[in-house]
Image (spheres, rainbow, N blue to C red):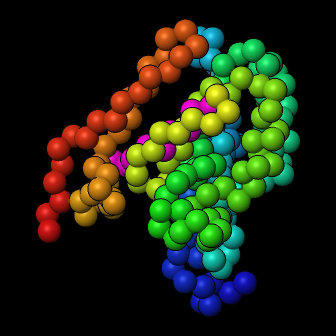
Amino acid sequence: MVFEQLSERQVKLCQSEYGKKMFSLRMGEGKTYRSFDYRDWHFILLDSIFVKLPSDYEGRIDAEQLAWLQKDLSLAGPQRPIVLVTHIPFFSILPVLEAGQTQTASPELIIDNTQEVLKSCEGYNIKLILQGHLHIVEDHRYKNRKYITSGAVCGNWWRGLRMGHPEGFAVYTIHGDEVTWSYHTYGWKAEV
């Protein structure tokens, strides 16, 4: 591939220290996904952004990461409460609200292989799935799992509300095996 034929964004994606590579080297201990334990809970941070050129990305958990996830879940065991964290959501009502019930959700909005990933989680105590990407706030429960999509600190990319959702951040509290949460806006106003 010749760099002169690529857009500026595509060149950045090809550079050795851009984006995921930078994260994996500086923060991810060589990976873009990982897990850790905090008290009695197990947290799994997934990399749901599958980079594709030239169309940029789609929401996907690749085969290598899925195999790692299955091994990590087996080490955590079926009883321990687990939190999955993903940037691109596994589930959202937003695509239905925007495009209608008969439209397929774009893989740029929802993880394309959601069913495969969640099926691999069956038999484990997944209590909470934290999601982002959409810059809106959602709270859903399905099969005894809570799916929370947090808003964004930048709201509508620093231009005010995103579909009526203010800029902000979520705070989660764990008591035993129950999770409560609240969303906080900090009063920032866009200059129009």
Image quarter hosting the C terminus? bottom left
| Residue at 61% over, 71% down | 103
| Residue at 56% over, 58% down | 19
Name the one closer to the observer, 119 or 2. 119
Residue 155 placed where, x, y %? 31, 54
Residue 46 placed where, x, y %? 66, 42
67 versus 11 height, above or below: above
Residue 79 placed where, x, y %? 75, 14
| Residue at 50% over, 21% down | 179
57 versus 147 height, above or below: below
Name the one closer to the observer, 103 or 9. 103
Residue 136 placed where, x, y %? 40, 51
Q: Find the residue positioned furthest to the front.
A: 101
| Residue at 82% over, 39% down | 120
- Is 7 displayed left or right of 104 in the figure? left
Q: Is residue 15 visible?
A: no
Q: Is residue 139 magenta?
A: no
- Is 38 displayed left or right of 138 in the figure? right
State the extent of the magenta-drawn residues as a range: 145-153
Residue 59 image-quadrant placement = bottom right
Residue 83 image-quadrant placement = top right
- Is 187 displayed left or right of 15 in the figure? left
- Is 175 displayed left or right of 51 in the figure? left
Image quarter hosting the N terminus? bottom right
Q: Is residue 146 magenta?
A: yes
Q: Is residue 99 visible?
A: yes
Count of residue discs: 0
